[in-house]
Image (cartoon, rainbow, N blue to C red):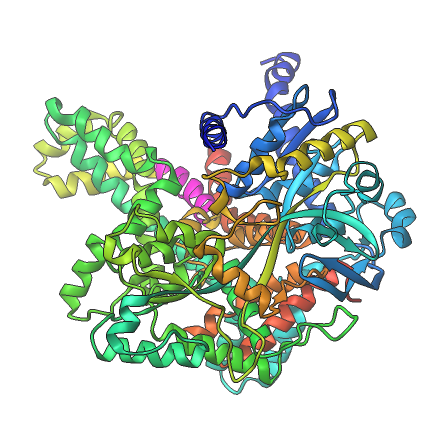
Amino acid sequence: MKHKTFFWFVLPSALAMLLFIFLPMVSIVIQSLHVSHEQVIVEVESCGPFGCRQSTTIDQEATEALRAAKPLGQFAGLTTYLDRGHLAVNEVGQAWDASQSWRAFGASMLNLPFYKAMAFTLTFTFVVTPLVIIFGFLIAVAVNSATKVIRGQLIFVSLLPMMITPLVGALILFWMVDARGIVGSLLQDISGDPNLSIKASTPLMWIMLMVYGVWHSAPFAFIVYYAGLQTVNTETLEAAMIDGATRAQRIRYVVVPHLLPLTTFIALMQLMDNFRVFEPIISFSASAHATSLSWAIFNDLGGETRQLSSAAATSVLTVIGITILLTPVLIRTWRDFGRK
Amino acid sequence: MYSWKNFAATTAFAVLSGTTAMASCGVDAGRVSIVGNEFPAIQTVAAGAAACEGLDVKSNLTADHQQINVAGMSGDPAEYTTAIIANSSVVALINEDVVRPLDELVAAHGADIPKNQLITIDGKIYAVAFMANAQTLTYRADALEKIGMDVPATYEDMLAAAEKMRSMGVAENPIGGAYKAGWNLAQEFVNMYIGHGGEFFKPGSAEVSVNNAQGAATLEMMKSLTAYMNPDYLTHDSNATNAEVEAGNVMMLNMWGSRAGSLMDDEGAEAMVYENIKVGAPLTVAGGSMPATTLWWDGWSIAKNISDADAEATFLAMKNGISPSILNDETMSQAVWMIDGYTPAPVNDGVFAAISMQAEPYPMLPFMGLLHTALGDNIADFLQGKESAEQALMDIEAAYTAAAKEKGFLQ
């Protein structure tokens, strides 16, 4: 392709990326380096329907000029990144000095919001991603070997979990596992414990969230693999059959190697998606048991006083986290291209 | 008499069909755009404002109002000319300096608004209140009768009654509460801490001070109550708690006055449940006289970044929205209205009891929202037995302090 043609060809996507990816990233980085101006607090009397009281308010006039000159707030460098709500450098140091054992150190780390969120986010990512790939592959192979008559219906049903809005899908599961729901009561019967409640137990809630994660994302892996299966070379398969390969051997030595590049693609997408786990935590009201980085951003912005800098810092940390996670996969892809 | 009845019926019909009879509000041009929470009383006020003749009145009522009102009022001109807010959420608007003092408008058009409805800070009027609300005791009279105990007056009474209900098989988990991690759980802490006589901040400063004996006692009492709650309590907000009441599982709870009405109507529950639901005075705790609840008002403020003409139109429209003309058979019981002609119903007894017991209003402090968020995030670990009360209180203080530094309240 000529350089000029190439330029005009990629221009629209490059513009869109600049506008919707690059500029917002610049904006969160700048925001995260600033904090609000020092607030001048004055004691005043405030009155309402229930009488008058001494209270405090912000003296807006005192900082009006300052705010007009620097609407972003004061430059704080990396302060927000290092505070207790994020990397908590001081607190980690103190916990290190004070703890006698690794166990105690771990417990103090999990008491800090960022590390608590990371613990769940990483567990979720590394449990759900492989399971999604395995289940997606199994469903694809199963559907592909079904007779042509029912294949359409099977594909439709297999895709349902992905078509349902995540929030709604999670809510359906949430009510099913309620102590009075169908799955919840069943578990109580099986375990013989009438007080067993998934929503009250942290380990069960983690499992529930991961089950939801797999349920919701497996169709994505399925549809990609199913498309891949249609391109498997039938001659190779027939040759393997003639050589006496069993069905398992054919899958192991012909199908799986053929689908390997797709696995890289699914792993890439799923690592990114699962690292941003958010909706199930909201739908399952699970924040008492599990938090994620995305939930922390939501929580910062959802309070009556919005903490924009804190949310921005968590966003930047999320971007860095995803970059680190994807590096091995990206290096692999890069090498593959280099070879060709 | 006939004509009065006829009038009430027409108004009720008009409200239901969304075309309230047009009223002249003393202004014939201007932009009015309302943002606010969504519950029946607020819909009534918005409909009352929309009834002004000649005005272009838009409203956006949503449960997520507090996530959009600051942004929607920050532009110039502001998208929303008025926000319907409560004593907690008005602070966010004042902090961001997006609402205007109403003194001139009140002087020109609001001479008839009673002084106690005007919310003033440092002598300047920032909002006009129209209804009162509070969380108070709500209980099943039949359940208390079965165990032969009086209506609880303290949380200790409530625990004793709960134990007896459980042992006598009246209910397995007789206590209810909006203990969902986050805003609701923090609100219950605020109530209980006030009941214990605690102060949230060092006087006159933004320095938090909840790590004390009252704070620990508050957490311990909350934990004692959760022992008698549905084990899923950390996922139950007011709606889920009310559903438990209507299902006949919960016998006693601390519930919003504005939501008690839906428990007493014949929808969603058996007659045994709704006929026996009663509302009582808020409970005290630990031998104190201050009820463990907070008083709330709902009211409206007007945006700063709009033209004076629009501000005037908005003021007059909203004033019409809270005028006696909005009261009818249907709207009367929706709230404890601060409107002439309002006659209380039994469902409102709790809120009136809270007012007459001189309960504390929810603190209207610039940094209270940050403490509320910190409380909501750090109490659940203690209730689940993962950490001590002292550790939970230390976490709350540390989380608040980090947030307050970022917002410039502490250095």
For the point 18% across and 33% down, the residue is A143
Tell me if residue B26 comes above or below residue A312 in the rendering: above
Q: Nearer the viewer, residue B262 or B80?
A: B262
Spot occupied by residue A224 in the image (x, y as percentages of width and height): 32, 32
> Is A269 a magenta residue?
yes
Tell me if residue B149 comes above or below residue B279 in the rendering: below
Q: Nearer the viewer, residue B399 or B262?
A: B262
Is B78 placed left or right of B354 in the picture? right
Q: Visible in this render: residue A35?
A: no
Q: Residue furthest bottom?
A: A100
For the point 67% across and 76% down, the residue is B209
Residues in magenta, as a range: A261-274
For the stretch drawn in magenta, the main secondary structure is helix
Tell me if residue A247 comes above or below residue A123 in the rendering: above
Spot occupied by residue B144 in the image (x, y as percentages of width and height): 30, 72
Spot occupied by residue B267 in the image (x, y as percentages of width and height): 30, 45
Q: Nearer the viewer, residue B265 or A135?
A: B265
Is A17 placed left or right of B143 in the picture? right
Tell me the quarter of the picture where residue B383 sits: bottom left
Q: Visible in this render: residue B65?
A: yes
> Is A173 a magenta residue?
no
For the point 73% across and 35% down, the residue is B315
For the C terminus of chain B, which image quadrant? bottom right
